[in-house]
Every structure is written in C-alpha cells, then in structure tokens.
Amino acid sequence: MPERKLSSTNFYNQLFLEEKRALNELLYLLSKRWMAEVLFSIEGGNSRFYSLREDLEHISDHVLAGRLKYLAQHELIQKNYLPGNPPRTDYALTNKGEELSKILDGLSDFAVNKMQFRNAKRTNEFYYVPEKRRGRAKKPLTVTCQRPG
C-alpha cells in the first residue's frame, strides 16, 4: 500500500484531529443522554442509586446504572461500598469530577447569558435561535437543560 504524502490535506486534517482528540472524547462523553444530569445530581448531594433515580425521575434504572459505571470508569465519580446487610453503595465526585463540574457551571452560565436561548413556558427546554444565513433562517435547535437547585 502506498504511503500517504506528508504534504496532503488528508495528512494535515488527521494531525489536526489527533491534536483535538482528548477534547472530542470529553465532548462525546458529556453528550451522552443523562451524563451531565447524573454528574450534577451527585454534586447536589444525591449519593445513593435510589436518591439519584428519584432526583432524575425520567431516567431508567438501566441507563442510570450505565452512566454511573461510565463516570466511575473515567474517574469522575468514586463508587464506595458500605458494609452491612444488605450491602450498600455510595457515589461521590472525585477531584476530577468536581473540576469538570465547575467547568460545566461556567458553560451553563455562558449558555444562559451569552447565547440566544429563550426559556420555553412550562418546560425545561431552551431554544437556540441561530442567526440568519444567506437569507434563510435555520430551524431552532431544542436543547434540554436541567440543573439542581
């Protein structure tokens, strides 16, 4: 198989994307449904599975368990086993999780204060109204945001 030319645009695109790989992986992690909400709920003091499920009333047990496992794998939360009968599990943010939560707070503030979001009545949905381009307005993008407190 022939080698790719080092001066090709494909080569430069690959280099650029590899430099941004960590950021793209983090954005992919956070874009998973319920991921940020689970992180915020733990930050808000819900440390047990059932308190998380009650706080996030529309999440299924299967999805919640998967998100907790994924957050623990990436060391954003810590899973603590408590002895007793029956054995219990407790979740807490790690230092890395607390740092990410602060960054997400800043992004939330930016979204509310700097973007063109308007609060929809009787829902937690916000609508981003993009600027007009070439005389045509694009359809609004619906974004659901939920933050404890």
Image (cartoon, rainbow, N blue to C red):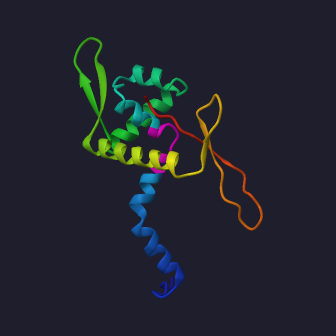
| Above-or-below relation of 100 to 79 | below
Is 145 a magenta residue?
A: no
Residue 142 rendering spot, x and y as whole percentages = 64, 44
Taking depth in this image into account, of 121 and 79 the one nearest to the observer is: 121
Residue 75 rendering spot, x and y as whole percentages = 30, 43
Is 32 a magenta residue?
A: yes
Q: Is residue 100 left or right of residue 112?
A: left
| Above-or-below relation of 53 to 78 | above
Residue that appears at 48% across and 80% down: 11
Residue that appears at 65% across and 31% down: 121
Taking depth in this image into account, of 88 and 26 the one nearest to the observer is: 26
| Above-or-below relation of 18 to 60 | below
What stretch of residues is rendered in magenta? 28-36
Instruction: List the single residue furthest toward the right.
Output: 135
Taking depth in this image into account, of 46 and 105 the one nearest to the observer is: 105
Taking depth in this image into account, of 135 and 23 the one nearest to the observer is: 135
**Which is the main secondary structure of the residues drawn in magenta?**
helix
Q: Quadrant of residue 43?
A: top left
Residue that appears at 42% across and 63% down: 21
Q: Is residue 83 left or right of residue 31?
A: left
Instruction: List the single residue furthest toward the top.
Output: 85
Residue that appears at 40% across and 43% down: 105
